[in-house]
C-alpha cells in the first residue's frame, strides 16, 4: 500500500492523555491545567475548560454524548464537563490514588480505580459500588507465587463490560479481571507481565503489555492471537466496526492490524511518547497524540474499508 499521509492537526503543548469522543471530537488533558477539545478532522478548537480548583488533569473519559467529557485530576478531583458552556456539570472528590476512569456505555455510571479497588459513581457523584481487588493466590506454574497477608496490588486501565453489569480492570499482579456488581471475579485473562493498556468491544478484549506483547481475547477467556512488538505497548484502540486494532509503543511506533485477515500495516512514527490513539469515523484516518502535545492524523490503507466474509 502507499505510505500513509501525515497531517499535524494541532500542537497543544505538553499533555498526558488524549481520548477520541463522539462525532470525531478529541479531548486532551494538558499540563497547563486545561482540558482542550478539538475537531478530529481539522484540528480546530471546540472547547477549552479550566478547572477552578487548580488541579492538573491526568486522564479523560468520554460519555456517550459529545457534550460531556470527564477528567480526573492530580488533587483527587473528578469533573464532568459541559462542553457547550465550558463549565463543570458535576464535581466530586475521590480519597485515594488512581489514574484511570471510564464511562459506562449508557452514560449512567463512572468507574475509577482508587488504590486496590474500583469505585463506581452515579450521575450525582454518589458512590454506588466499592469493588475491592485482591491479589491472585497462586498464578502460573513457572512464576508461582503465594499471596501474603496485607498485600495490595495497583490497578491500571478500567472499563465497563458489555451491558454495563460489571467492570474489567488491569491488575499489577498480572491478570486482567472482570468483576461483577458485587466485586466477585468472574473471569481472568492472565499475563506474565503487567498490562499497560487495554481496549474492548462487545466481542473482543485487547491487551498491551510491558513486554511488547499484544493479545486479542474473547470474553470467555480464549486467547485468539498474540503479536509481539519491540517495545512496551502503551496505546490500543479498536476501529468503530471492530475490523482493526491500532497499536502504539513507547518508541512512538504506530501500527494498525486487520483483525479479520491478520494483515499488519506500519503507520509511522509519532512525534514523541504516545499518550492516545483513536480511529476517526468514515475511514478518515487514525489520530495520535504525543507527550509533547503534537496531535497527528494518519491516512489508512484501503483494506480498512474491506470486510472479510470467509
Image (spheres, helix red, strand yellow):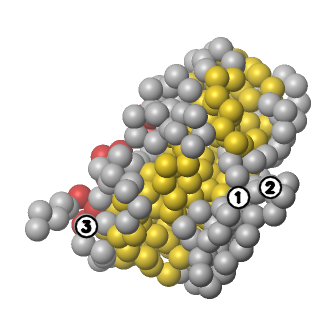
Residue under pointer 2:
152
Task: Report the front residue among 252 and 134.
Answer: 134
Task: Report the front residue among 66 and 220.
Answer: 220
Determine crowd level at label 1: few under 14, some 14-19, many 20+ residues with C-alpha closer than 10 A. many
Residue under pointer 3:
260
Determine crowd level at label 2: few under 14, some 14-19, many 20+ residues with C-alpha closer than 10 A. some
Residue drawn at the location 46% of the way across and 42% of the way down: 161
Q: Separation of disc 3 and disc 2 at Cα?
A: 39 Å
Residue 189 image offset from top left, x and y in percent: 50, 63
- Looking at the image, is mark 1 or mark 3 earlier in the sequence? 1
Residue under pointer 1:
135
- Give the quarter of the image for residue 286: bottom left
Camera sees residue 259: yes
- Looking at the image, is mark 2 or mark 1 earlier in the sequence? 1
Depicted 306 relative to depicted 191: above or below:
above
Depicted 207 relative to depicted 278: above or below:
below
Q: Nearer the viewer, mark 3 or mark 2?
A: 2
Residue 40 image offset from top left, x and y in percent: 49, 44
Amino acid at each position: 500500500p502507499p505510505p500513509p499521509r501525515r497531517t499535524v492537526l494541532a500542537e497543544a503543548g505538553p499533555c498526558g492523555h488524549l481520548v477520541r469522543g463522539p462525532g470525531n471530537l478529541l479531548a486532551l488533558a494538558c499540563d497547563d491545567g486545561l482540558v482542550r477539545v478539538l475537531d478530529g478532522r481539522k484540528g480546530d478548537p471546540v472547547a477549552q475548560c479550566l478547572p477552578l480548583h487548580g488541579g492538573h488533569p491526568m486522564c479523560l473519559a468520554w460519555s456517550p454524548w459529545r457534550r460531556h467529557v470527564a477528567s480526573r485530576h492530580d488533587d483527587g478531583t473528578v469533573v464532568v464537563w459541559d462542553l457547550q458552556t465550558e463549565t463543570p456539570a458535576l464535581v466530586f472528590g475521590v480519597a485515594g490514588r488512581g489514574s484511570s476512569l471510564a464511562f459506562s456505555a449508557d452514560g449512567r455510571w463512572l468507574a475509577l480505580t482508587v488504590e486496590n479497588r474500583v469505585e463506581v459513581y452515579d450521575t450525582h457523584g454518589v458512590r454506588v459500588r466499592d469493588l475491592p481487588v485482591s491479589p491472585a493466590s497462586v498464578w502460573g506454574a513457572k512464576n508461582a507465587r503465594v499471596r501474603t497477608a496485607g498485600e495490595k496490588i495497583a490497578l491500571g486501565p478500567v472499563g465497563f463490560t458489555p451491558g454495563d453489569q460489571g467492570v474489567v480492570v488491569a491488575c499489577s499482579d498480572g491478570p486482567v479481571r472482570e468483576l461483577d456488581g458485587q466485586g466477585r471475579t468472574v473471569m481472568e485473562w492472565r499475563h506474565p507481565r503487567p498490562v499497560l493498556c487495554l481496549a474492548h468491544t462487545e466481542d473482543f478484549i485487547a491487551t498491551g503489555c510491558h513486554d511488547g506483547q499484544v493479545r486479542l481475547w474473547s470474553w470467555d477467556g480464549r486467547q485468539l492471537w498474540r503479536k509481539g512488538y519491540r517495545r512496551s505497548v502503551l496505546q490500543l484502540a479498536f476501529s468503530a466496526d471492530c475490523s482493526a486494532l491500532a497499536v502504539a509503543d513507547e518508541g512512538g511506533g504506530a501500527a494498525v492490524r486487520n483483525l479479520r485477515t491478520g494483515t499488519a500495516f506500519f503507520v509511522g512514527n509519532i512525534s514523541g511518547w504516545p499518550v492516545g490513539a483513536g480511529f476517526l469515523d468514515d475511514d478518515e484516518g487514525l489520530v495520535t497524540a504525543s507527550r509533547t502535545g503534537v496531535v497527528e492524523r494518519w491516512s489508512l490503507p484501503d483494506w480498512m474499508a474491506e470486510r472479510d466474509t470467509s
